[in-house]
Image (tube, rainbow, N blue to C red):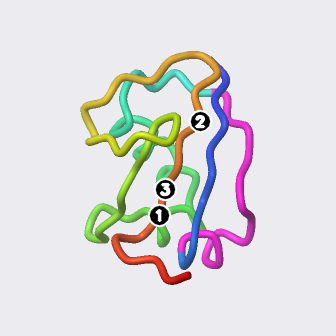
């Protein structure tokens, strides 16, 4: 399925882009995060399992067990973002 992935704050800076369209087989946010980490750097460092990363699906805060669907917008951001 295709989903839109958005990166914010320090994660965006580390990855070097604000977003991308991703073709994925992941069924959950956890599986998507693992797929992105498996790409290697810079995704591996920015989304590493040891880091605190917040996630949302279609602008609703979600935990890693949340199910993905075709056309969803997924956001990754650090726990504290400044404005």
- For the C terminus, the quadrant is bottom right
Query: What residue does disc 3 label?
Result: 76
Residue numbers of the magenta segment: 11-23
Outermost residue to the front: 83
Location of residue 60 (image quadrant): top left
Q: Residues within 10 Å of mark 3 (few under 14, many from 20)?
A: many
Q: CA distance from mark 2 to mark 1?
A: 13 Å
Q: Which mark is residue 77?
A: 1
Q: CA distance from mark 3 to mark 2?
A: 10 Å
Secondary structure category for the residue under label 2: strand
Q: CA distance from mark 1 to mark 3?
A: 4 Å
Q: Residues within 10 Å of mark 1 (few under 14, many from 20)?
A: many
Secondary structure category for the residue under label 3: strand
Q: Residue at x 56, y 62 (%)?
A: 43
Q: Is residue 65 above or below residue 54?
A: above
Secondary structure category for the residue under label 1: strand
Q: Is residue 56 above or below residue 26?
A: below
Return the x and y of residue 68 as percentages of the image width and height: 45, 24
Q: Which mark is residue 25?
A: none
Q: Residue at x 49, y 70 (%)?
A: 46
Outermost residue to the bottom: 82
Q: Residue at x 72, y 72 (%)?
A: 16
Specify whether 45 is left or right of 4.
left
Specify whether 61 is left or right of 17.
left
Q: Is residue 6 above or below residue 65?
A: below
* Label 1–label 3 contact, CB within 8 A: yes
Q: Which mark is residue 73?
A: 2
Location of residue 18 (image quadrant): bottom right
Specify whether 67 is left or right of 68.
left
């Amino acid at each position: 399925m295709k989903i839109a992935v958005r990166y914010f704050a320090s994660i965006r800076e580390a990855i070097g882009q604000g977003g991308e369209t991703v073709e994925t087989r992941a069924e959950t946010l956890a599986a998507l995060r693992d797929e992105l980490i498996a790409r290697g750097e810079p995704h591996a460092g920015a989304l590493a399992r040891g880091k605190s990363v917040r996630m949302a699906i279609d602008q609703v805060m979600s935990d890693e067990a949340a199910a993905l669907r075709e056309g969803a917008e997924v956001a990754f951001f650090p726990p504290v973002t400044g404005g």
